[in-house]
Image (cartoon, grey):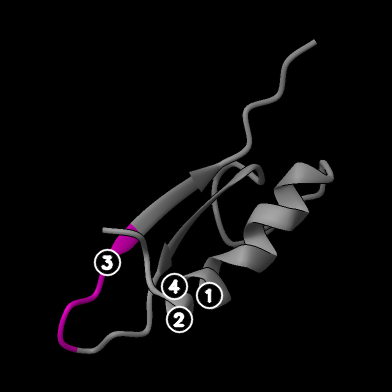
Amino acid sequence: MPHCSELWDVISRYIYTGLQGGSIMKGWMDRENEIIACCSDGTRPVIFKIERIDYE
């Protein structure tokens, strides 16, 4: 089943920031290229680890 639109609303800003090479959560996480995000569904929350993988 595809994800709901609320989920995309929550994680899209982190996805776009990571795609552009930006710091996703500088100061909040040990590594600035990752974040733990959660959808806003109070009865069935889903937790995601979003990580930008840098390569040369």
Measure how far apart labels 1 and 2 are at the Cα level: 6 Å
Name the kind of residue labelled 2 in the image.
Glu
Residue indicated by mark 4: 7
Earlier sequence position, callout 3 versus callout 1: 1
Position above or below: 16 against 3: above
Cβ atoms at labels 4 and 1 below 8 Å apart: yes
Cβ atoms at labels 1 and 2 below 8 Å apart: yes
At x 38%, y 75%, the residue is: 39
Residue 21 image position (x, y, % from top left): 82, 41
- Main SS, magenta region, reads loop
Query: Mark 1: few, some, or many residues within 10 Å (few <14, many ≥20)?
Result: some
Name the kind of residue labelled 1 in the image.
Val
Tell me: 31 left or right of 7: right
Query: Which stretch appears magenta?
Result: 43-47
Residue indicated by mark 2: 6
Q: Does the magenta stretch include residue 11?
A: no
Measure how far apart labels 3 and 1 are at the Cα level: 11 Å
The disc label shown at residue 10, or none = 1
Cβ atoms at labels 2 and 4 below 8 Å apart: yes
Residue 16 image position (x, y, % from top left): 74, 56
Under circle 1, the secondary element is helix
Tell me: 20 left or right of 35: right
